[in-house]
Image (cartoon, rainbow, N blue to C red):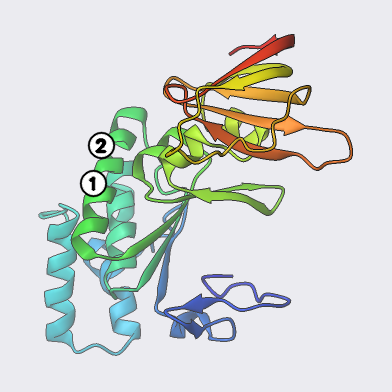
Amino acid sequence: MLAGFETPDEGRILLDGKDIAQVLPHQRPVNMMFQNYALFPHLNVRDNIAFGLKRAGMPRPQIDTCVAEMVALVKLEGLEKRKPDQLSGGQKQRVALARSLARRPRVLLLDEPLAALDKKLRESTQLELMELQRRLGMTFIIVTHDQEEAMTVAGRIGVMDAGRLDQVATPRELYEAPHSRWIAEFVGDVNLFEGQIESREGQSDGDRDPGRGHARGCRSRVSRSPRRSSASRSAPKRSSCRAAARPPMRSMRMRSTGSKAS
């Protein structure tokens, strides 16, 4: 829907306050880098990068300048005349990235951009993507099923399950204060302890009380990461709620009813 290939049944898609839900794909200030790169096999590196600029009617001198900038940006100097079948997987990825950046979109959509790369190349490319984003000052929206990749490159992460956006947060917030057990297990290793709260102690006046409502006798589940823990309660006739507990400031005594550790 962001790219314009699907139309929402209802609602709006706002970009800088403007609704672009009904704007045609080629008229949006949005570009997309496809998972399979979608390079034109009959065009060389230069012409693949220049394709969108030509379609936009940009003058030839400006196209030449822009293509040269993109080639230098993604470090493909000397490969301009090669066809896609003469390139490695990493080089193809760079061509696709350069082509999607050439028109300077305000938002760049990347669909599993590193999935086809080997582990070593994927790790180095993650850092390059982060540097490119900072240098260009552009918004990157990356779709990935690799949790480590998301935690490395993202400033904010949206976790989706069955088409529903369950939580949007910074990587640190997502790891330290997940909204649900499913998210806690999805984003990384976590130890889960289930029990019944018997007492609470160690809360300072200046610290906010994210665990408010965890009364004595309330059944609770605590997820423990290396640096933080979070607790969620389950009480009769009440919907479940979540809270993040700071170990140095507060403690809970629980009567164990079972545990799961990973």
Amino acid under disc 2 = Ser
> How many other residues sit within 10 Å of disc 2, few (<14), some (14-19) or many (≥20)?
few
Q: Which mark is residue 93?
A: none
Residue at the image point whose x is 39% and y is 43% from the top = 114
- Viewer-closest of 107 and 238: 238
Residue at the image point whose x is 33% and y is 86% from the top = 56
Q: Is residue 90 visible?
A: yes
Residue at the image point whose x is 10% and y is 54% from the top = 78
Left or right relative to 137: residue 262: right
Task: List the residue tagged with mark 2.
Answer: 124
- Viewer-closest of 223 and 217: 217
Task: List the residue tagged with mark 1.
Answer: 128
Left or right relative to 231: residue 75: left
Q: CA distance from mark 1 to mark 2?
A: 7 Å
- Counting from the top left corner in percent of width and height, residue 196 is at 75, 18
Q: For the C terminus, which image quadrant? A: top right
- Counting from the top left corner in percent of width and height, residue 137 is at 25, 65
- Counting from the top left corner in percent of width and height, residue 101 is at 29, 67
